[in-house]
Image (cartoon, rainbow, N blue to C red):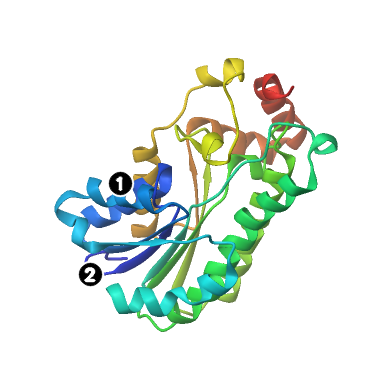
Amino acid sequence: MELTGTVFVVTGAGNGIGREVALDLLARGASVAGLDIKSDWLDETQSLAGKQASHFQAFPIDITDRKKVLALPAKVEKALGLPDGLINVAGIIQPFVRVNDLDFDAIDRVINVNLHGPLNLIKAFLPGLLTRPEAHLVNVSSMGSYAPVPGQTVYGATKAAINLLSEGLRSELMGTSVRVTVVYPGAIGTNIAGNSGLDMSGAGEASTRKVVAPADAGRQIVLAILANKKRITIGQDASALWKVNHLSPDLAAGMIYKGMKDLLP
């Protein structure tokens, strides 16, 4: 897919992977409608875009607000033109506790942001994408969707739902102009814990784990769009556990438990 002159909608564009995806798209000649819950984060992304800043339009929004999300396509089209792509990056993790200790407010929040949010965006923008000569839909899942992380079971369940949502959409969209990519990041050097409202200061060994730089993750997602890839993993951990999980889910679960159990209280 050629990116010059295209318009992409990117959720989570105010920080982390979403910001880097937006900046990479801008550098390749695309215009970006950046979505995030905090307007000051989006302002910072625009300031980092340099000469391409005029091609970035900020749309502060809570992606769980269905009514506002469904009104977005008309606003994006007016500001930048018809979108050619949607990249669902925004997501949060849950408190690092077992399901038995996880309250329903936290459960509902994770499900609303990680599953209902992307669904709201897809329902809003897919009709328009189907009118484009070439279009792309990207959903960011997680290594935790196929290799269970202790203390992140509900988070992993929402990302597993994103996996099948993506695969189902790809099946339904065969014969159309819309391509679908699902992304499986491993450990990425973002502040997803802080953005999820969690205090990870006592996480111990977690801070020493090898992570992928957000800019590298963002670039890999954009390259996947250019190559029309159906699925990509990001990071050696995600790639290795993908392979191990296909050979032995029990072995993969044991490996990740051994490496992550220190995060549990």
Q: Please tell me whether residue 211 is drawn above or below residue 108 in the rendered image.
A: above
User: Residue 69: where, in percent of width, then height?
Assistant: 51, 70
Does residue 110 appear left or right of residue 32 in this picture?
right
259 or 118: which is nearer to us? Answer: 118
Q: Which residue is mark 1?
A: 44
Which residue appears farthest toward the bottom when viewing the image?
131
**Residue flagged by tag 2: what amino acid is it?**
Gly
Residue at screen point 82% across, 35% down: 101
Secondary structure category for the residue under label 2:
loop
User: Residue 182: where, in percent of width, then height?
Assistant: 53, 55
169 or 189: which is nearer to us? Answer: 189
User: Residue 106: where, in percent of width, then height?
Assistant: 72, 45
User: Residue 12: where, in percent of width, then height?
Assistant: 45, 52
Q: Which circle marks residue 5 in the picture? A: 2
- Quarter of the figure with the N terminus: bottom left
Q: Which circle marks residue 240 in the picture? A: none
Whether residue 186 appears in this view of the structure is: no
